[in-house]
Structure formats: C-alpha cells, structure tokens
Amino acid sequence: MDSPGTPSRAASASGRSSVIDSIRGCTLSGVRIPREDLKKKITFPEYIRLAMREAIRAQDVDAAAVAQFYEAAHAEGAEPAEPPEFPLIVFINSKSGGRHGPELKARLQDLMGEEQVFDLLAVKPHEFVQYGLSCLEKFASLGDTCAKETREKLRVVVAGGDGTVGWVLGCLGELNRQDRLPVPPTGIIPLGTGNDLSRSFGWGGSFPFNWKSAIKRTLDKVARGPITLLDSWHLLISTPAGEELEIPYSLKETEAVPLDEELEVEGELPEKVSCYQGVFYNYFSIGMDAQVAYGFHSLRNEKPYLAQGPISNKLIYSGYSCKQGWFFTPCSSDPGLRSLKNILRIYAKKVNSSEWEQVPVPSSVRSIVALNLPSYGSGRNPWGNLKPDYLEKRGFVEAHADDGLLEVFGFKQGWHASMVMVELISAKHITQASAIRFELRGGEWTEAYMQVDGEPWKQPMNKEFSTFVEIKRVPHHSLMVKGE
C-alpha cells in the first residue's frame, strides 16, 4: 500500500507521456477561475512587495527604503493591510521552455504582484531567502500581523526543469538549518526536458499547449493542494587535490570534509584533497549515461540554437547516445567503455541495517544510478514494479519518495537501457540503501563521467589515489505541493 500523500514507485502517473500531459492541459479548467479573484487571493499588499524587492536589491533588510515602506504602511491613519488568503511567490527560469519562458513570466506577473515573480537570471533563490524572506520575517517580528500571516501561509512555485526545482529546494532547505520555520512548500510548472520531479508530484511532464488559461488552474492548485514529503540527499565528493574540476552549480567546493569514520578506507589517502558538496532530489549516476548527458550539454552550450525545446533536445540526446558508444559498447575495445567494475567499489548501508558492507558491482554494467524518485528519464520507472516475493528474496522494500532509501541499479549498455526505458524489462538491481559510498580508482581510465539531477560533469581519475563519492540522507524532508 502506498504511504499517505507520498508518490509510489508504482504510480502510473509518473509514466505518462509528455504528449498526453500536454493534451490533458488543453482542458478548459483554467478558464473557470476568475482572474481577479485569483489575483486577490495570492497577491501580497503593495508595501510588502516593494519592501521585499528593495531588500533584495540592496541586499540589506535594514536598508532605509525598506524601513520607509514599513513606516508608511503603519503610519497613523493608514488603513490596516489584509493578508492574502493564499500568498504565492514564483521563481522562473525564463531560459527554459523555449520561446514560452519570457511570455510565461509576463503572464505570471499579470496574475499577481509583479514583484512576486523572480526571474532566476536576476534574483537567485538564496538571495530571496536571505533578504526577501528575511524582510517579511523582520516585519512580522515588529508586530505586523499581515506580514506574519503571509510568512506562515507562503507557498512557492518553480517554473523550470528538474535542475531549477532542485536549486530552489536546496535554498529553501537552508531554512531548516537556520530554524526559520515553516519552510514554504513548493509546486511546479514543468519547463524542462525530463521533468521527473514534476511528474512525481502530479504536475505533469510538459508545459501544456493552452498554458495561458491553464496557468491560472496551476496557481490555484499550488495555493490549495495537499502537502507531501520528499527525501533529499547530501552528496560529498572527495578527490585528490590538484585536478581541475568543472562542477555543476548544484555542487560547491568546500574545505576538506572527512569521510564517514565507520567505514575504514583501504590503502593510503593523499596528503591534500579537494571536496565538493551539494544536495540532490532525483538521482546520481556514474558511467555512460552521464557521458552522453555531458556531450549533450556541451553541444547545447556551444550551439544553443540547436536546442529549442523538449523534442529537439531528445533528438540530439539520442544522437549522442549512438555517437559516444552507448549502443555499441560490447563491440568496443576502448577501456573507457568497459565495465564500471574495473574502476568502482560500492559500499552501502542496506535496508534495516546501520552497518556498512561492500556490494558487488555486476561485471556487465556500464552505468550505475542511485534513484530517489518514481520517475527517471522523462517518466520511466527503471527500478520496476517489483512483486512482494522478489522484494523479500532480495531484502528490498517497496520504494517511496520519502522512505529514506535510494534504489541503486545498473544499465548494461544502450540496448539494455532502451528495453528498460520502455518498461519491457527492469534494470539490473544492485541494492537499496540509506547511505552509499562509491570509491573510484583510475587504472587505465583517466576520467569518469558523473551527473546529479541531470547536471553532468567530467571527473578526473587518479591512478594512485581513490576518488570518493559519499551519499547520505538530509535529516529534514523537503515539502512539496501535490498537483494531482
């Protein structure tokens, strides 16, 4: 039985095609929501909107202009402001969604206060948390009941792909660490290619064809929808110092961080290491799938005119899958295309166990994925809908997005992955774990490819010392608004 309010791996909704999602979005449901009624329910009072904007612009909640907006709103004779019934703010990646990004931004600004729509090209989510949200909290601490109620009821909409959603969730997650509660729950307008986070929580797999009317319905759903939970996972990469690494924006270089002391490292460690940390919500992978993603992203950055939407993106992606050997690995003698077993060890804390143990790496796999959600690769479920007797035999449990476990599986090569992705077969099941350590050592390999939530990078390999990737669950859940 599915856990209440939590997407199951077996949920059929996660496997919907983008076309079906878009057609479903063409209903007239959005038209039945009067524009002015919606705007009144979600729009902040003007003084709060302007003060938050000024705090972000000045990067100072104590800026003189911020204080002026507050004082004017609370001057003698001023009419008390009424808090919105369902206060919302929106983060939009205006570069996503092809040509629709700028149009969607304008439409959202028309449906609420312009200052409540943040273009991520101009305002980063951590800036909103540090200055905009702090401004709201400051007003509340001064006895402003409107600001207090707005802060308590606040919900967030993210218009973008999985990477954008993860970026915003990571910044909101800092509120837990700072004890600035409640953390606003998040709904999604899917603008990316895969949109697996969006699919997993009922927001669909693609931007609807009739988005101008459907967007009202989406905002209303975010305002009223039930809240569910999502695990997030801390990623630590420790690699010998001296190698240049182009990391994705979801990872940050930090001071040296020790690995889990409960698991002893075999062999010597380098004198100096470089450490990178981040959080992911959907998956981490090593191997050929990440190499294909890296090639695709490199081409898109060099020639952005080739990637104008989800369909063209998928065609280019397919071409890279063939070009980079994903489908022809068995015929290749290139050491870089051989089994991950040559360079990789896996250690895990399995289901209902607090002890680390080594997990065998199947000799056939060219790609290994640690998956958190019921949706991967545009709505597919490579872990599969496993029968109870198989779960018991393997020591697995039914998977959910808030169960504190990652499903680890492998792809043998492109043909195997293709069969898995059309759900004719399941992936190669490796383990199910609450913590994982990958240890990589170069040998013939000079580099490996990795990706986290669709952001790939090239990882240099060292022949003498290992690179470690350690994954553990973040103590606090992320809060998501359920769309359907």
Image (cartoon, rainbow, N blue to C red):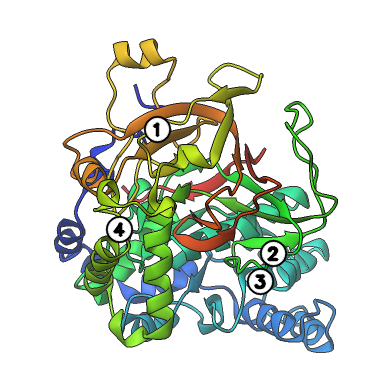
State whether residue 178 is above or below residue 353.
below
Q: How far, Cα to Cα, is label 1 from label 3?
A: 47 Å
**Lower sequence index among marks 2 and 3:** 3
Residue type pointed to by label 4: Gly
Q: How far, Cα to Cα, is label 1 from label 2?
A: 28 Å
**Lower sequence index among marks 4 and 2:** 2
How packed mark 1 is, by other alpha carbons closer than 10 Å (few <14, some 14-19, many 20 or more), is few
Mark 2 highlights which residue?
Answer: 243
Residue type pointed to by label 1: Ser
Which image quadrant is residue 63 in? bottom right
Q: Position of residue 114 (x, y in %)?
A: 51, 83
Q: How far, Cα to Cα, is label 4 from label 3?
A: 43 Å
Q: Position of residue 166 (x, y in %)?
A: 52, 58
Q: How far, Cα to Cα, is label 4 from label 2?
A: 26 Å
Q: How far, Cα to Cα, is label 4 from label 1?
A: 18 Å
State whether residue 44 is above or below residue 475.
below
Residue type pointed to by label 2: Glu
- Nearer to us of marks 4 and 3 is 4
**Marks 4 and 1 in Cβ contact (< 8 Å):** no
| Dot label at residue 128 | 3
Secondary structure under the numbered disc 1 in the rendered image? loop
Q: Is residue 68 left or right of residue 342?
A: right
**Marks 4 and 3 in Cβ contact (< 8 Å):** no
Q: How far, Cα to Cα, is label 2 from label 3?
A: 34 Å
**Lower sequence index among marks 4 and 3:** 3
| Dot label at residue 363 | 1
Q: Nearer the viewer, residue 275 or 448?
A: 448
Mark 4 highlights which residue?
Answer: 325
Secondary structure under the numbered disc 4 in the rendered image? loop
Residue type pointed to by label 3: Phe
**Lower sequence index among marks 1 and 3:** 3
- Nearer to us of marks 2 and 3 is 2
